[in-house]
Image (cartoon, rainbow, N blue to C red):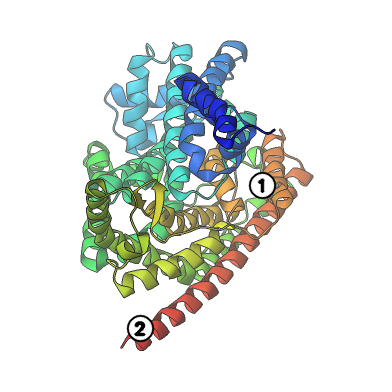
Amino acid sequence: MAPPKAASHRPAVRRKKSGTLVDSILDKYLNVRFFKYLLLEPAALPIVGLFVLLAELVINVVVIQRVPYTEIDWVAYMQECEGFLNGTTNYSLLRGDTGPLVYPAAFVYIYSALYYITSHGTNVRLAQYIFAGIYLLQLALVLRLYAKSRKVPPYVLVLSAFTSYRIHSIYVLRLFNDPVAVLLLYAALNLFLDRRWTLGSTFFSLAVGVKMNILLFAPALLLFYLANLGLLRTILQLAVCGVVQLLLGAPFLLTHPVEYLRGSFDLGRIFEHKWTVNYRFLSRDLFENRSFHLSLLGLHLLLLLGFAKPTWTFFQSYVRLRRIEDQLQPQIAQQNLELKKRPKKVEKDKDQKKFTSEQQSFLKAFEKSLQKASGGKGTAAPAQAEPERYGIHFDRCTQLALLPFFLCNLVGVACSRSLHYQFYVWYFHSLPYLAWSTPYSLGVRCLILGLIEYCWNTYPSTNFSSAALHFTHVVLLAGVAKQLVQTMRINNAAKREQQEQQKKLQ
């Protein structure tokens, strides 16, 4: 005769109750499902990011200790700053072994500080560890942006960070100024997305003051200012950027202004053909031809104009979502406060009625547009991330802000007159985001990233590596453009649906 049901269930209940806290943690986290979550789910990036930073700390220390340092520009930087520290403010007289000083004033101040910290530039090992800190800080800022957007799977960022020898070399084996400029740039982007405008403008201007390549982000930033702040406040932020430049350059502008402007903001500077990564297949005469340079500038402007409309649309949608967030967050906070006072079983539909019809329709449009943009299924409607708690992950709208910035920079890099090996850092950390902003398959996306890495690691560059780099840039730009067109269509369809719903309500 079979035992009673109650008796059959009693042992299982007892085993469950007798389980320790350690057992429950092991059951929850030591399994294939959680491992897949860490690898594939963008929401897991804050957790994965901590392990990435710890691993990168070890990797950078190993590289510094085991791989020989290669002198390229560090000594020249120190010589240029030494002239300034000795009282010279004439940029035409500030020189190093590699030539005249060609960077703005913020570079001079930062490397002058490094000059003192590293015993007049002689303690290179200490400088390497300082740049390892710069690498980790910048990586943390980049991971914060990726975590907010919830777009790229963590495994992509892990592979990208760990496998790039060139990037580690640029930071801790070469000590170039490009990483310093890019660090300040990513600090500015984080501040802009936190809506700390004046501080963000200050950091952006400081980044430009280290190296002019940061101006490649300027067209997108101008539209971002206008969409978020309007014309008058945009002018104010531009004034902040301008004042920072004037303050930085004051010692040089007050004494030898022409030499400073000509030396630090020389847009017509001719690069040496022997160092080019992207135009090895051109003859030296054509590479240095002014008409060729003007053609690239014209192409750059045309591409910026072509992407201006979707960029503006993305920024406008971002602003609307932030406004909706400001409206909904007090309601969500009030709901969660009420839930604490209610019995455990609460009807979710009744709480949703507190959102206005306009808010609900806008959230639906947001869900559709980001679902397509992120290449997966997402939900923007009020959801219970935890039992008995309401929340909306509005930070996903960061996608609408980041893509135009990264795209604007990619256009500038693709149209550059010449790329040197240290310039890889200009756009390296945005490449996974751009690749995952295309409609391409996983294999094609990884192939793009792998081919770009191959091109930048081929030294000296070859006709094939230079041509391949241009090819991948074109393929990446075309993929992002196609995705933008598709997203614009979805956005227009969502607008029409929203308008129809409003008409019905009226």
Quadrant in which the C terminus appears? bottom left
- Foreground mark, 1 or 2, reads 2
Q: Nearer the viewer, residue 26 or 255?
A: 26
Q: Amino acid at mark 1?
A: Asn
- Quadrant in the picture for the N terminus: top right
Q: Residue at x 53, y 15 (%)?
A: 61
Q: Residue at x 49, y 48 (%)?
A: 150
Q: Which mark is residue 423?
A: none
First in residue order: circle 1 vs circle 2: 1
Measured as percent of width and height from the top left, residue 278 is found at: 66, 47
Residue drawn at (41%, 85%), measured in percent from left and top?
500
Q: Where does label 2 land, which residue?
A: 502
Identify the residue position indicated by label 1 in the image: 278
Q: Is residue 277 above or below residue 117?
A: below
Residue 194, given in percent of the width and then of the height, sits at 31, 48
Q: Residue 420 appears at what percent x and percent y?
A: 59, 39
